[in-house]
Image (cartoon, grey):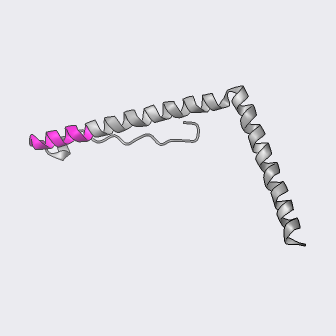
């Protein structure tokens, strides 16, 4: 098989795959899937930022208690994050 023919066949496969992906993206955009997915990610990002702020605040409070002479053994235990399943 010649190089030109192989390039032609490869180009046909790539452009066909690209066209189908573009069609899927267009249909998803028309149905509003992108907006829903964006909303889900925005909620996830907000939750992650909130948890990070809570963890930083907890660490700050523990350091301040330690500075006041409270031993770590008398401080409340640091909560562990819940285990996440695929449905969370």
- The image quarter containing residue 24 is top right
Q: Seen in the image, is 13 located left or right of residue 42?
A: right
**Residue 21 point in image, percent of width and height:** 75, 43
Is 65 inside the magenta-drawn segment? yes
**Residue 29 point in image, percent of width and height:** 69, 31
- The image quarter containing residue 23 is top right
Considering only vertical position in the picture, is 31 above or below 4?
above
User: Quarter holding the N terminus?
Assistant: bottom right
**Residue 19 point in image, percent of width and height:** 79, 44
In front of the other: 35 or 44: 35
Q: Seen in the image, is 7 located left or right of residue 68?
A: right
Task: Residue at 15% x, 39% y: name it.
Answer: 65
Q: Where are the magenta residues, as a range? A: 58-70
- The image quarter containing residue 71 is top left
User: Quarter holding the C terminus?
Assistant: top right
Farthest-out residue, left: 69
Task: Residue at 32% x, 35% y: name it.
Answer: 54
Q: Seen in the image, is 19 located left or right of residue 81?
A: right
Task: Residue at 44% x, 32% y: name it.
Answer: 46
């Amino acid at each position: 098989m010649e190089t030109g023919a192989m390039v032609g066949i490869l180009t046909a496969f790539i452009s066909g795959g690209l066209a189908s992906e573009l069609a899927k993206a267009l249909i998803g955009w028309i149905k509003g899937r992108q907006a829903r997915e964006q909303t889900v990610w925005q909620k996830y990002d907000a939750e992650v930022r909130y948890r990070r702020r809570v963890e930083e605040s907890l660490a700050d409070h523990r350091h301040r208690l330690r500075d006041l002479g409270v031993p770590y053994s008398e401080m409340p235990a640091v909560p562990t994050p819940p285990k996440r399943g695929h449905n969370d």
